[in-house]
Amino acid sequence: MNRRSMPAALEATRNRKTLALAEIVQAYWIQSPKKLLVVGCGTGEEAGFLARHFNIDTTGIDIGNEFAFDREGATPALLQIMDAHSLSFADNSFDFVYSFHALEHMANPQLALNEMARVLRKGGTFVIGTPNKSRLMGYIGSATPLSNKIKWNVNDWVSRLRGQWRNETGAHAGFTENELLVMCASAFQVQPASVSHSYYSALYGKRFVQKLIQLRITRWIYPCVYVVGTRQR
């Protein structure tokens, strides 16, 4: 996929979601980062958006099996083919590590998180987002056609009914919020914070999210979960 072929609505939706999460993350910065690593960057368009928005030296990595890099859309980010399980960067190379909907595709997500922690300098910030394994429905806010949303949700429920609702089976189930918090805490040696409420409030409004919280149904309603933390000095 290249920048010219990406539907405008899809690109705008991706940028809006990325911006909402990025602005939340800024509150956790001890100081403005100088080097950003995007793990599982896909086409690289998101890495480029972050690089331009923050005016920061950005590197995006992906294993390259599913996506072709869109280097025009990624400008000025540097894109590299690399396995997240074995990053070629030196320890403490980055001030900010960002991984959005990539962990669920990895054979050993804990090892990938350990690698992200290794290359993140002390005092640096990380943000990790994945599909919510407890969700009843997903893809709601996506710009993809309704037919795709229906098909993908049907596939998800078929996987559940067959007892195959696991990343290992290719279901891309993701992780529950608690699972993601525990894995990140183990890798980065700090207790991260959930920012799912803040993220969905930014997208859909605080009143709407507060109602979901009061009804105690966010665990099943949120299609994705997001955690943020700062590596210990």
Image (cartoon, rainbow, N blue to C red):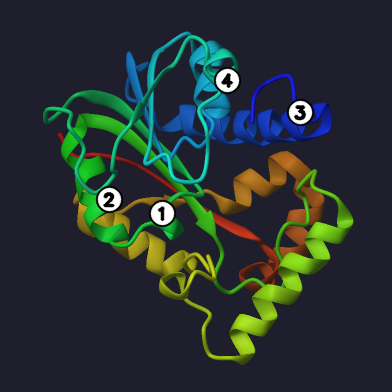
Label 4 environment density (alpha carbons within 10 Å; few <14, some 14–19, many ≥20)? many
Where in the figure is residue 165, as x and y percent of width and height?
53, 80
Q: Is residue 62 above or below residue 204?
A: above
- Mark 2 lies on a secondary structure that is helix
Label 1 environment density (alpha carbons within 10 Å; few <14, some 14–19, many ≥20)? many
**Pointers 1 and 2 in contact (C-beta within 8 Å):** yes
Which residue lies under the disc numbered 2?
113
> Residue 218, located in which quarter of the rendered image?
bottom right
- Mark 4 lies on a secondary structure that is helix
Which residue lies under the disc numbered 3?
12
Task: Kindly identify the amino acid type of the residue bearing the numbered disc 1.
Answer: Leu
Q: Is residue 40 left or right of residue 22?
A: left
Question: Gap in Å between the C-alphas at discs 1 and 3?
Answer: 23 Å
Identify the mark nearer the N-term, 4 or 2.
Answer: 4
Task: Kindly identify the amino acid type of the residue bearing the numbered disc 2.
Answer: Leu
> Residue 37, located in which quarter of the rendered image?
top left
Identify the mark nearer the N-term, 4 or 1.
Answer: 4
Of residues 120 and 190, the one nearer the viewer is 120
**Pointers 4 and 2 in contact (C-beta within 8 Å):** no
Question: Gap in Å between the C-alphas at discs 4 and 3?
Answer: 11 Å
Task: Kindly identify the amino acid type of the residue bearing the numbered disc 4.
Answer: Phe
Which residue lies under the disc numbered 1?
103
Identify the mark nearer the N-term, 3 or 2.
Answer: 3
Identify the residue shown where x is 22% and y is 59%: 186
Identify the mark nearer the N-term, 1 or 2.
Answer: 1
- Mark 3 lies on a secondary structure that is helix
Question: Gap in Å between the C-alphas at discs 4 and 1?
Answer: 20 Å
Identify the residue shown where x is 32% and y is 59%: 109
Which residue lies under the disc numbered 4?
49
Where in the figure is residue 1, as x and y percent of width and height?
64, 31
Q: Is residue 13 left or right of residue 171?
A: right
Of residues 140 and 194, the one nearer the viewer is 140
